Image (spheres, grey):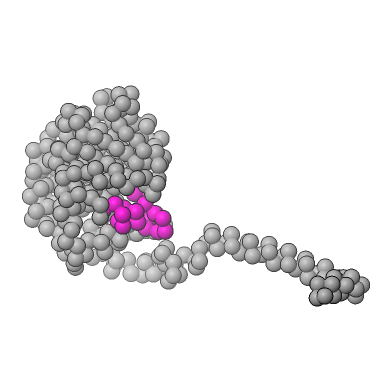
Amino acid sequence: MLDRLKAITKQLPILKPIIAERNQLRIELAKLQAEFHHLQQEQGFVPAGHYYSPIPAWDEIEQKKDQIFGQMPTQIPGIELHPEEQFHLLQQFLDYYPEIPFQPQKTKGLRYFYENASYMYSDAIFLHCMIRYLSPQRLIEIGSGYSSCVTLDTNDLFCNGEIQTTFIEPYPQLLESLLTPSDQDTVKIIPSKLQDVDLSIFETLEANDILFVDSTHVSKVNSDVNQIIFEILPRLASGVYIHFHDIFFPFEYPKVWIDEGRAWNEAYLLRGFLQYNSEFRVVLMNTFMQLLHESFFQENMPLCLENRGCSLWLRKL
């Protein structure tokens, strides 16, 4: 009966224009709601810089830049940095440093060269030396690029090609452009997002093997960074070494990067992860060692000061 009354009412001449206007308003409302949803997706729940936003307020950073970036401690509360052990390991690298074959520009017979856009002097030197120091059987890299070239060149020239290398890279075009024809048979590339990779691959790593991480550097819902910290690191066997790239001492990003608009947060998550953590040990951090031992680098490893890098090395205990 009610539906019939509604149908009759809609036919009344006096109500027809009102009903038509209502229907038009409903259409307009639906359009506005769709546009609002689109703007929310573009801008986020709140504007950048809002206290609910992970993107910082640039004006506040500028006001506190001396406090944020001007202080350089030698200790971090809750994290054992083991500076003496780090320096002792660094001294072991002196056996390898004179034999490093890399040059500033592309050289015949080598994939890697120092003057590239993403993985330069100090980081490459530390990776080369760590590989030779550890003699790993396996190396898995999350990400890829010029760092992969360091690994492959070092493996070929100093490890008899015996390291099993795997690169997890959803966008492998750069890596593929840097490989040699012979790499097609020996290098394993998984062209997938880390979030889609079977976690059991990381359980194959054993003591002195290397998990090399060069991620998106952003912790968020369904991010590779969350997958690494929450799912992969706990699965690693005792004695596995882990490298994180773009981690500066004291777990803060350079101001110039912040000024560029980068809102990375991996370093902060790692700092929290390492506080009071008895399962993972800091074994080497190039920016920390350069802070404490500038003269050592000047005298013994001067190429590390051409670009100081940003590598953090850990060991699973």
Residue farthest along the front direction in this orientation: 1
Q: Position of residue 6 (x, y in %)?
A: 83, 73
Q: Position of residue 160 (x, y in %)?
A: 17, 28
**What is the quadrant of residue 261 in the picture?**
bottom left
Q: Is residue 82 left or right of residue 3?
A: left
The residue sitting at 15% across, 54% down in the picture is 317
Q: Which quadrant of the rendered structure holds the N terminus? A: bottom right
The residue sitting at 81% across, 72% down in the picture is 3
Q: 77 and 74: which one is in front?
A: 77
Q: 23 and 5: which one is in front?
A: 5
Let me know if residue 182 appears in the view.
yes
Q: Is residue 159 left or right of residue 54?
A: left
Q: 39 and 12: which one is in front?
A: 12
Q: Position of residue 99 (x, y in %)?
A: 13, 33
What is the tally of numbered marks visible in this picture? 0
Let me know if residue 259 appears in the view.
no
Residue farthest along the right direction in this orientation: 13
| Residue 169 in the image: above or below residue 283 | above
Magenta span of residues? 214-233
The residue sitting at 38% across, 49% down in the picture is 195
258 in magenta: no
| Residue 156 in the image: above or below residue 94 | above
Q: Is residue 148 left or right of residue 157?
A: right
230 in magenta: yes
The residue sitting at 55% across, 63% down in the picture is 40
Q: Position of residue 282 (x, y in %)?
A: 17, 55
